């Protein structure tokens, strides 16, 4: 499986790609190509073009969750081009407010149906023989959930749609996550269940750890116990948390253009 970060908060020196507070990653596995998330400003498409990557002809677009730093860039597909499959949780179109601002998917269902073949499911699903959409994430470690209170239609929004991708490699599992609002440990446990393997070998994406506190410390403890050799925290992982992680385990830098091959 090959992954390429097309959008992240960070950029890498000498690469001349653009950054934004968002996330987008191209995942290529077993002859198929999927886009996980589309960032905020659509720079995933610009960065892909700079890197000579054909982002338009993907087999599917997968959304890790509804927040607009992952979904606003969907408008790059609002053309007469091919209609890719769009895989997301059925709660994609719910209203979510943060500090009074609407931060959910900015496009109505009818608009997306014009440009995508919608596949809305809360169930895990195989995208190829070894690449999986994880579906709704059971909260086996409740404390790991994102504690931020955003408002939904009927009370606090608990990020029911948050999910990730998992790849079943030869010797273990690799996970690509968007924001991990459901809790990175909960995502990794779901990845183990869905792939039928117990060893996590690599994780890349946002861990949604915004400051060092008791929750972040517990999650770092969990990650250390999991003994994951390839850890790439990015997007919504604070510097203070990366510093604390780096003192306990090997972590790697991520930026637009980061490309990895995990087998
Ligand atoms: Zn989010
Ligand atoms: Zn995000």
Image (cartoon, rainbow, N blue to C red):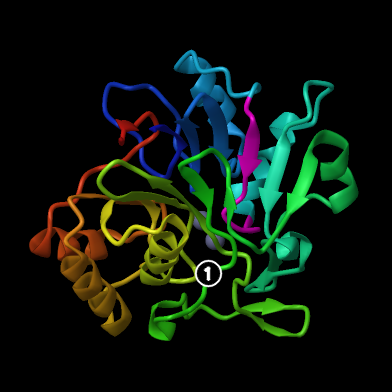
Q: Is residue 55 left or right of residue 232?
A: right
Q: Residue at x 54, y 38 (%)?
A: 128
Q: Residue at x 38, y 22 (%)?
A: 16
Where does the image place residue 45, in percent across and percent down from the top left?
A: 58, 26
Q: Is residue 126 left or right of residue 110?
A: left
Query: Relative to 52, does residue 201 appear above or below in the rendering?
Result: below
Q: Residue at x 44, y 37 (%)?
A: 19
Q: Is residue 105 left or right of residue 236?
A: right
Residue identifier under label 1: 137
Ligand 1's quadrant: bottom right
The region drawn magenta spans 58-67
Where does the image place residue 198, in percent across and percent down from the top left?
A: 30, 62
**Residue 163 can be seen in this image:** yes
Where does the image place residue 74, in percent across and percent down from the top left?
A: 69, 39
Of 199 and 174, nearer the camera is: 199
Type of secondary structure dominating the magenta stretch = loop
Q: Is residue 60 left or right of residue 115?
A: left
**Residue 22 can be seen in this image:** no
Number of on-image labels: 1
Q: Where, quadrant-wise, is the C terminus in this rendering? A: top left
Query: Relative to 127, does residue 250 appear above or below in the rendering?
Result: below
Q: Residues within 10 Å of mark 1 (few under 14, many from 20)?
A: many
Q: Please identify the quarter of the rendering in which residue 215 is found.
A: bottom left
Q: Where, quadrant-wise, is the N terminus in this rendering? A: top left
**SS label for mark 1:** loop
Of 184 and 66, nearer the camera is: 184
Q: Residue at x 20, y 56 (%)?
A: 228
Query: Relative to 76, does residue 166 appear above or below in the rendering?
Result: below
Q: Please identify the quarter of the rendering in which residue 239 is found.
A: bottom left
């Amino acid at each position: 499986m090959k992954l390429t970060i097309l959008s992240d908060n960070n950029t890498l020196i000498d690469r001349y790609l653009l950054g934004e507070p968002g996330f987008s990653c191209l995942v290529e596995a077993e002859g198929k190509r999927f886009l996980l998330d589309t960032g905020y400003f659509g720079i995933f498409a610009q960065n892909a073009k700079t890197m000579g990557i054909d982002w338009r002809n993907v087999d599917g677009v997968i959304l890790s969750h509804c927040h607009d730093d992952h979904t606003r860039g969907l408008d790059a597909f609002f053309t007469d081009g091919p209609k890719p499959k769009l895989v997301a949780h059925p709660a994609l179109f719910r209203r979510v407010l943060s500090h009074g601002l609407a931060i959910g998917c900015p496009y109505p269902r009818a608009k997306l149906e014009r440009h995508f073949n919608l596949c809305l499911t809360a169930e895990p699903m195989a995208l190829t023989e070894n690449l999986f959409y994880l579906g709704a994430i059971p909260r086996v470690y409740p404390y790991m959930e994102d504690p931020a209170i955003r408002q939904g239609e009927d009370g606090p929004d608990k990020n029911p749609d948050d999910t990730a991708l998992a790849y079943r490699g030869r010797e273990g599992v690799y996970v690509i996550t968007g924001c991990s609002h459901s809790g990175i440990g909960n995502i990794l446990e779901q990845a183990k269940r869905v792939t039928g393997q117990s060893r996590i070998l690599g994780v890349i994406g946002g861990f949604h750890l915004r400051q060092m506190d008791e929750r972040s410390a517990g999650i770092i403890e969990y990650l250390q116990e999991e003994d994951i050799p390839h850890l790439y925290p990015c997007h919504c992982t604070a510097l203070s948390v990366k510093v604390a992680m780096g003192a306990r385990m090997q972590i790697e830098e991520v930026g637009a253009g980061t490309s990895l091959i995990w087998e």
